Image (cartoon, helix red, strand yellow):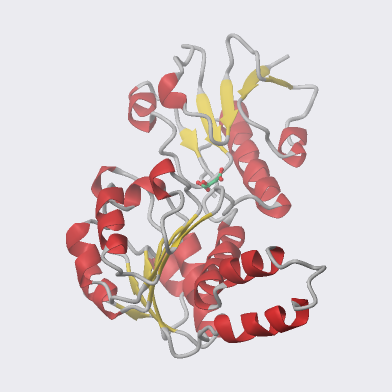
Amino acid sequence: MAFQIRTYNQIAPSGLQAFPQSLYQVAPDIASPDGILLRSANLHEVPLPETVQGVARAGAGVNNIPVTSLSERGVPVFNAPGANANAVKELVLAGMLLGFRHLKQALVFVDELDPSSPDFERAVEGGKKRFVGHELPGRRLGVVGLGAIGGQVANAARGLGMEVIGFDPGLTVEHAWRLSSDVRQAPNLEALLAESDVVSLHVPLIEATRGLINADRLRVMKDDALLLNFARDGLVDRAALLEVLGKGRLSVYVTDFPHPELQGVERVLSLPHLGASTVEAEANSAVMVVNNLRDFLENGNIRHS
Ligand code: MLT
């Protein structure tokens, strides 16, 4: 067998099938792998054998991988930029609707109704008055980070009639071209936060972005703003968030990073980390990184898309 690949996590079958069986042995228990294929496992905590030539992550973020020390060893890390962008975008749209239409409370309300009660219908009718929401058109969405995912969120929100402003000091020409022309660029993050009815985060977690949404930045946000974090947990300073929520500020915090400290906190809606969890996104991401890892191992090429 020419190449041995150690896998962590469940990888979409189409990704695994992209390794030709004649050339590759792919399994979780390979002792001296040429390549590593993973999704969410924390590679910071795992000693990587000297044999490893390339690491591939079936996802966008690489904060679970020791990229710097691998680079120093000359080991490239492949990720799947954009491969799950549509899936994350769809969850962000759902998150906005969860917040604006009080969907969680309404679902719980119906679940808790007594079906045998003679008052069932009257109670249902009461819910109609109790959960009056707001519509999206005319609301201003601030998108922090306009890469593959942020760009899709911005364009979709424009399509839904929202006004969209964005902030991304590292905006690439490629991503700028894909943006709807009426996505206005904010001069800085504070301006975006101060103007937005909804703020959605789409930046990677790196040292510069850890705690990006801190006490000062939460302070400039509108009192009734909706904050969506489907990017990375560490982007929001949790203590500062709990403080502003405790003061009755922010209408909702929606995230797919549950945390014990957020459990039961009013106006926090937590989902499992579901942004990229669709059959389509898992397959796209796995196939993309497997092809890139193969191209590197077999031909020495380094591709990232
Ligand atoms: C990503 O970085 O693309 C997501 O966090 C992927 C995942 O859920 O594994």
- Evaluate whether residue 188 shows in this view: no
45 relative position to 36: left or right: left
Front-lying residue, 279 or 94: 94
Q: Is residue 136 above or below residue 296?
A: below
The quarter holding residue 111 reads bottom right
Q: Where in the figure is residue 159, as x and y percent of width and height?
A: 55, 84
Front-lying residue, 233 or 13: 233
274 relative position to 264: left or right: right
Number of callouts in the render? 0
Q: Where in the figure is residue 50, as x and y percent of width and height?
A: 46, 11
Quick one: which residue is furthest to the front in this view? 118
Front-lying residue, 171 or 251: 251
Q: Residue at x 62, y 46 (%)?
A: 285
Q: Where in the figure is residue 241, as x and y percent of width and height?
A: 30, 57
Quick one: which residue is furthest to the top in this view? 31
Q: Residue at x 51, y 42 (%)?
A: 79
Quick one: which residue is furthest to the left in this view? 216
149 relative position to 71: left or right: right
- Evaluate whether residue 280 shows in this view: yes
Q: Is residue 33 above or below residue 285?
A: above
Quadrant location, the N terminus: top right
Q: Is residue 37 above or below residue 131?
A: above
Q: Residue at x 33, y 78 (%)?
A: 196
Q: Where in the figure is residue 88, as x and y percent of width and height?
A: 56, 59
Q: Residue at x 50, y 70 (%)?
A: 153
